[in-house]
Amino acid sequence: MLRQIPTASLALAEVPRPAAPSPDDVVIRVEACGICGTDLHIMQGLSYRPELPFVLGHEPVGTVVEAGSRASEWLGKRVTITLFTGDGTCPECLAGNERLCPNVVSDTGVFNAWGGYADYLAVHAAQLLEVPDSLTSPQAASLVDAGATAANSVRVAMEREPRRVLILGAGPIGLMSAELLTAHGVEAQLTQRSARRRATAQRWGYQVFEQIAQAPGPFDAVIDATGSPAVFNDGVKALGPRGRYILAGYAQVPNADFAEVSHKEVSIWGIRSGSRDDLRGIVDLAASGQIRLPEIDTWPLEQINDAIEALRSRRVDGKAVIVPGPAE
């Protein structure tokens, strides 16, 4: 539970088990929940500020154990979720892009709806997506937001029919973006300052550089999965004319060189997670073995602060996932 902002740790607490309050809601027994960099930014006071107290965790996977009268077909199924609930009436919601709703109601585990760092989680049935048997719950959890973000980023990159794409950051989003581009037959190269993550990308067979300037550009698109303000200017320099700079990670860039953006007529595209189709597509590709998934490190719920500290200190090569205990 998040009880104050900023904070370095979450608090263990006992709260009543959630119930399905409406006919269209379900309760999930959480089996795994990924940790996202956004969680750390919220804790630092650098991102969303949910009403406190609040339960974070927006990458959950689990089994439906309770359902409202209009959601009974989900009982017993292992599921994950799409994150956003919109107003349901705007053009973006009707097109399946609830994350872009101008009147977005909630982002599960981020604001207005408690998340998956808990034994149980209540969500709307409209958010559910069934998880294939070939994926473990921790594997599926690695895809919920990071995978959807990678799929959305690559879809935007592919609109330009690129031949070469540079990915900044070889964490989960970066590696899955590289896998998706490779599946499309597009050459993907990566940059990564961390020697550990750089070695992982190299083991996967990718050409990876410590510095952006070392990458042999120009590139048709750059996918920035770092969330670091330090890479923006060099990332733009790596693009060719009318290239696309795709922001899969969030950062404030106080010294952005927009002269370079203008001289090349670069397009900057923001990415906010992904749509249901993005999530379903990457889940299916992972389940069928067409793409590889990052290495997964797991911690029990009671040790979530150890997991958060491991992420902060860059001791996680792939994806950090919380695994709550079995049901009583």
Image (tube, rainbow, N blue to C red):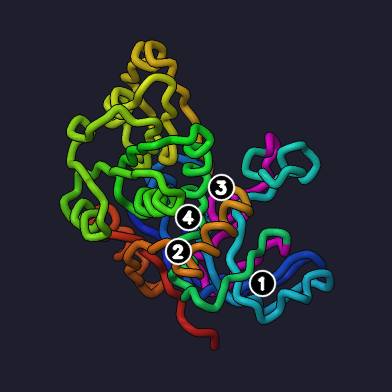
The kind of residue tagged 2 is Gln
Task: Give the distance between the C-alpha atoms of the residues marked 1 and 2, in whole angstroms.
Answer: 31 Å
Earlier sequence position, callout 1 versus callout 2: 1
- Secondary structure beneath label 1: strand
The amino acid beneath tag 1 is Val
Indicate which disc, 1 or 3, sits on the residue closer to the N terminus. Answer: 1
Kindly identify which numbered label has been placed on residue 290. 2
Give the mark toward the camera: 1 or 2: 2
> Are discs 4 and 3 less than 8 Å apart at CB?
yes
Residue range in magenta is 101-125
In the drawing, what numbered circle is on residue 317?
A: none
Q: Quadrant of residue 260?
A: top left
- Marks 4/3: CA distance? 8 Å
Q: Residues within 10 Å of mark 1 (few under 14, many from 20)?
A: many
Binning the other alpha carbons within 10 Å of mark 4 as few (below 14), some (14 to 19) or many (20 upward) gives many
- Which residue in the protein does label 4 denote? 147
